Every structure is written in C-alpha cells, then in structure tokens.
Image: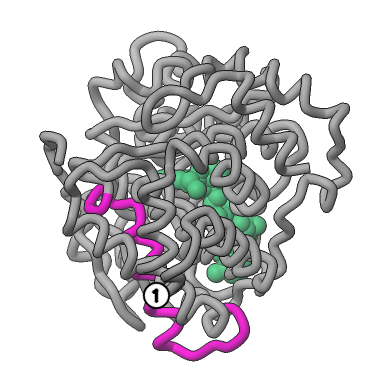
Amino acid sequence: MQNFDLYNPTRILFGQGRVAELGQWVPADARVLILFGGESARKNGTLDEVRAALGQRSVSEFGGIEPNPSYETLMRAVEQIKRENIDFLLAVGGGSVIDGTKFIAAAVHYEGDPMEILFTYAGNVKKAMPFGSVLTLPATGSEMNNGGVVTIKSKGAKLPFRNALLFPQFSVLDPTKTYTLPQRQLANGVVDSFVHVMEQYLTYPAGGHAQDRFAEGLLQTLIEIGPKAVETQEYEARASLMWVATLALNGLIGAGVPQDWATHMIGHELTAKYNIDHARTLAVVLPAMLQVRRAAKHAKLLQYAERVWNITGGDEEARIDAAIAKTRAFFESLELPTHLSAYDIGKDAIDALVEQLKAHGMIALGERQEITPEVSRAVLEAAL
Ligand code: NZQ
Ligand code: ZN
C-alpha cells in the first residue's frame, strides 16, 4: 500500500426531506447565489425548497449551467457574484452544476486569467468561496470530492481540475430528488460510478486489501441494485445508488492504491468532440481498455473476474475474456452502447481524437503512465 493523505471535510446530509435542514450550515448573514442547470431543479420543486430553507437571507439565482459545463457560461456567474457581492454558493443539480460551482468558487478569487485554472489542474488556486450542494443526479461523486471537469468551448477542450479548497462544505443527498430523472441519466449514473471504481481498482496488486474489498463491494452493489434503480422508483435502490456513487469517488477507495483514469481522459475527448454523455463515453472505452491492457492488468482482471463476477476455474485467459464480456454486457443491459459505431464514429475519426489527447497533454496516462497516444489509438480502434 502506498503512503497517502486523506482529507475530506464535506458534511453529508443523507435522506428524504433533508433539504429543509441546510440553513443550519449556511451563515445566517450570507448573501447566497443558488446555481442550477436547466429547468429540472425548478420543475421538481427543489429550488423552492432550497429558498425556503434559506429563510430571510439575501438569495439570487444563476441558471443555465449546461451538461458538461462551459468556462464561458461559468464566467458569467463570476461576474454576477462580483456585481452582487455574493459570499456563499449553493449548487443544485448533478455533476455539471456542482463542478461548475467549484470552478466558479476558485475563479472569483483567482489572481490572473481564470482560464489558467483549467490548464494548471487548479494547482495554483490559493483561495475559494465557500459552497454547498444539493445533489439531484447520483453519478459523479462531485458532491463529496474536490475535483471537476470544465469545457473551454472556444478551444474544444474538456479539462479536469482538483484542489483541496474545492470540497463542498456540505451536500444534501435526498434520494427522492432522483424521481424526476429520465432512465438515461440514471443508467449514466450507474455506469459512471462503476467506472470510477474500476479506475481506482483494476490496476495492479498493491497491498490495498481493504480498498479492494471495498471496491468489489461497490461494484457488486451496482450490479445488484443498478438495474432496479433505473427501472423502478424503489427508494432503497435509489438510496443505495446515490450512496455508492458518492463513495466511489470521495477519496476512500483510491487512498494508497495505484489509479488508472486513462478511460476517463479518452472519454473526455469523445465528449468534447461529439458531445456524447460522459458515462456513455466510458461504456465504450472501458471494455476496449481492459482488452488492450489485459497483460498489464492480468492479476487484477483475474481477481475482478472471481470476486465480482464469480468466474473461477479454467484457463486464465478465458476467465479474463469472460470478465470483460460480463462488463460489456452489464453496460449494454442498461442501454449504454459499448462500441463507437453506435455513435457513427468510425476509424477515420481516430487520428483527430489522438491529436486532441496530445494537445491536452494526455500522453502518459494510466497507473504506470504507459498509455501513450499510440496505446490510446489501439484502445479507440478496439472500441470501434
Ligand atoms: O440541466 P438540468 O435541468 O439540471 O438537467 C440535467 C442535465 O440535463 C438533468 N438532471 C439532473 N438532475 C435531474 C435532472 N433531470 C431531472 N431530474 C433531476 N433530478 O440531467 C442532465 C445531466 O446532468 P449532469 O449534471 O450533466 O450529469 P452528471 O451528474 O452525470 O454530470 C456529468 C458531468 O460531471 C463530470 C463529467 O465530466 C460531466 O461534465 N464529472 C465530474 C467528476 C467529479 N467532479 O469528480 C468525475 C466524473 O468522472 C465526471 O468527469
Ligand atoms: Zn466519470
């Protein structure tokens, strides 16, 4: 197990009806900006609930944060915050709104061009506004982590960032907020969470015995309750999906173990170029990544086969084939295609995607920084 620091200051308020309590975690004299996406937060009544919970505080709104949030939109919120002297932010939505709020929280106080935040992985962010979140889409874990992803539309670049100052102070996780989600977004949430776990688990044996068992438990939980959470409004399934999605990327299972993230970085380029939902890019890339990297991931692929899919006995390569096939079948069962052809993306598109990876510095990816542009090309070809 590698040395690690684990710091996570986010208070979680989990359960039905907890939005009403958020006022106790917002300063009584705060000048609050509520940030949200399209109309879902208003239509499902969450904005009204949040306003009621904020009582007599000064409250303004900033809507229109798009899925895959753009730098251009977020900078308009920064202007509003400075104009209205806002001092507390409250994100209401999914990963796009929460990530966008993290970027805004950093950009308001950034000395220099805020676009730099995205080109430096937020490495030189020294101050950030306080913020909380009300999660309405379980998928990214953004509600309990300090990372995000923002697209610079003018450059066609979707770039990740992370900084210890960018944890939400609190997040409300009310599973009933998922009741207005379309099945597509619920399925996205199952697969994004699944791949977050795989990025931190399916690498190479590193003595993370507890982390492995925890990761395997999250994967088995998604396999067990994921389809039910997509197809029904059963509270327990939605509550479990919400909590698994948060645990998948709040730092716990990734502490002290090697991490991959190459699937995500290649996925981001597909989203930036074709505007494919984040999770749907992962459903295409992960099976191909496992196939291309099966030798380097041999030991963990066998462990994953046995402990998650109960595939034991027989030829090792056959077991690995079966585990990859099970993974692909799970994504397809949730109606997330696992081939680029489903998005009319063919071999002729691969050169430009590899050039994008190079342009964004994504040239030594993966748990051993072995995913060069040539390996990424092989993965994209295997995903056709
Ligand atoms: O815009 P609104 O009206 O809110 O509609 C949204 C949006 O259209 C809708 N929605 C959200 N909650 C709803 C709802 N519709 C009905 N009822 C509700 N309760 O769902 C659509 C998608 O929302 P979005 O926030 O974009 O989805 P998600 O939560 O999957 O976030 C995706 C973004 O998160 C980033 C991705 O790159 C992408 O930009 N990620 C963030 C990570 C992090 N911070 O750690 C890690 C992830 O790997 C990921 O990269
Ligand atoms: Zn993700």
Q: Amino acid at mark 1?
A: Thr
At 86% across and 37% down in the image, what residue appears?
Answer: 346
Q: Main secondary structure of the magenta part?
A: helix
At 25% across and 64% down in the image, what residue appears?
Answer: 213
Q: Is residue 8 left or right of residue 242?
A: left
Of residues 130 and 192, the one nearer the viewer is 192
- Tell me residue 69's x, y (percent): 58, 40
Label 1 C-beta lies within 8 Å of the nearest ligand 2 atom: no
Point out the stretch of residues depicted in magenta: 230-253
- Tell me residue 337's x, y (percent): 73, 59
- Tell me residue 229's x, y (percent): 52, 80
Q: Is residue 241 magenta?
A: yes
Where is 137 relative to 374, above or below?
Answer: below
Number of disc labels: 1
Q: Is residue 242 magenta?
A: yes
Where is 43 relative to 71, above or below?
Answer: below
SS for dot 1 = helix
Of residues 334 and 211, the one nearer the viewer is 211
Residue 146 visible here: yes
Q: Which residue is mark 1?
A: 221
Which image quarter holds the C terminus?
top right
Q: Dividing the picture into quarters, in which one does residue 154 lie?
A: top right
Q: Is residue 241 left or right of residue 282?
A: left
Residue 62 visible here: no
- Tell me residue 87's x, y (percent): 29, 39
